[in-house]
Amino acid sequence: MYKMMTPGPTMTAVSVMEARSRQFGNPDVDEQFCEEYHQVCQSLAELLHTENDTYILGGEGILALEAACASLTEPGDRVLVIDNGIFGKGFADFVKLYGGQPETYTVDYHHPVDVAELEAYLEKNHDYKYATVVHCDTPSGVLNDISKICPLLKKYGILTVVDAVASMFGEEVRVDDWQIDIVCGGSQKALSAPPGLAFVTVSNDAMAAMEARTTPVASFYCNLLTFRNYYRDKWFPYTMPISDIYGLAEAVRLVKEDTGRIERHHRIAVAVRQAVKEAGLSLYLEYGDSATVTVVNVPEGLMDRDIIGTMKDQHGILISGCFDVLAGKVFRLGHMGNNANEDDVAEMLSALTKTLNSLGFVCRCDMKEIFLQCL
Ligand SMILES: *Cc1c(COP(=O)(O)O)cnc(C)c1O
């Protein structure tokens, strides 16, 4: 098996895999499970610095995004879709699917949203029920400053849906301080559990907006209102994937224990980028990178699939290409969650140096050496 150095899924701790293989009871009948579920939700809320209700949903990260849009959107609602990346733009589809009118605020994909420019736009245009914004837009690796964007939107009475799937636990996310109404997360990124679970935190304002709907949510599975009283009623809208949740509980425990993780993600990310640049490669972003992923332009004359194939076949390390408008243009080095450790990243960079050299792009240095010097 290869070492998975992709921007999610990541390598998973043995104890997480063991937790998933535990014997399990009936999550619908046994109230003890409700208690266990509640505890994991509380831990997630604590890590995200929020008092808001937190729910784990049985589905991959995308479910959180769709559930947020499904639950908030009523036919005709105007929604501001902040688009400076592929996931950012993608929110417009969810809004449309549930009858809303997305209005896309598109800016350059090579850097984060300029908050002053957004503010100028909002002064003239602010008649929106909610706005969507991506924290780390993984295909480009851009990190938007949601600590400023969300309070700004709140000032205009606009609710916020934040996709922090690829940033949280590698970058700080402070839901209450930053007034985020719904934050979306997934199990397979910096939390380093296998794919399969999503989670959301829901503010009182967001819950009030859902309760004030005059039309029903056009989905059962994506309806966050169905979770509202789960703890009081000891009832879930569907049978919870209990083994996945046992794995998640262990992953959350490990993240909680690892108090130096944000600092380590940043230190490793800075050193990776320095090494990549010194080798003569170029980064996709001008500035504003997330500490969880590095996105590198495919050098002239090379093919992304050759780089990725050689890394996997000759060195046993899986890195990632990209999709949509960035397909074939960049390759991505994941250093999030369990992969944000010096040894694995050094091994990846050593292999990448050899790979590029063998394909005809002569690196100006051994990226591993520069990486280790910069740590
Ligand atoms: C991974 C990811 C998701 C979850 O969706 P996938 O099906 O894994 O693509 C959502 N948003 C972002 C920004 C992600 O990186």
Image (tube, rainbow, N blue to C red):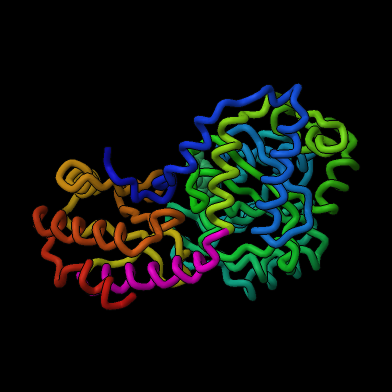
Residue 33 occupies quadrant: top right
Tell me if I can see residue 184 in this picture.
Answer: yes
- The location of residue 340, given as percent across then percent down, is 40, 60
- The location of residue 200, given as percent across then percent down, is 68, 46
Q: Is residue 211 left or right of residue 245?
A: right
- Residues 143 and 201: in front is 201
- The location of residue 53, given as percent across then percent down, is 78, 48
- Residues 219 and 345: in front is 345
Q: Tell whether position 261 is magenta.
A: yes
Image height of 25 relative to 314, above or below: above
Image height of 362 relative to 54, above or below: below
Residue 341 occupies quadrant: bottom left
| Magenta stretch: helix, strand or loop mostly | helix
Residue at point 57%, 39% (across, down): 62
Q: Which residues are magenta?
A: 257-279
Residue at point 30%, 57% (across, down): 344
Q: Is residue 327 left or right of residue 158?
A: left
Residue at point 81%, 65% (across, down): 156
- The location of residue 34, given as percent across then percent down, is 75, 34
Q: Tell whether position 124 is magenta.
A: no
**Image quadrant occupied by the C terminus:** bottom left
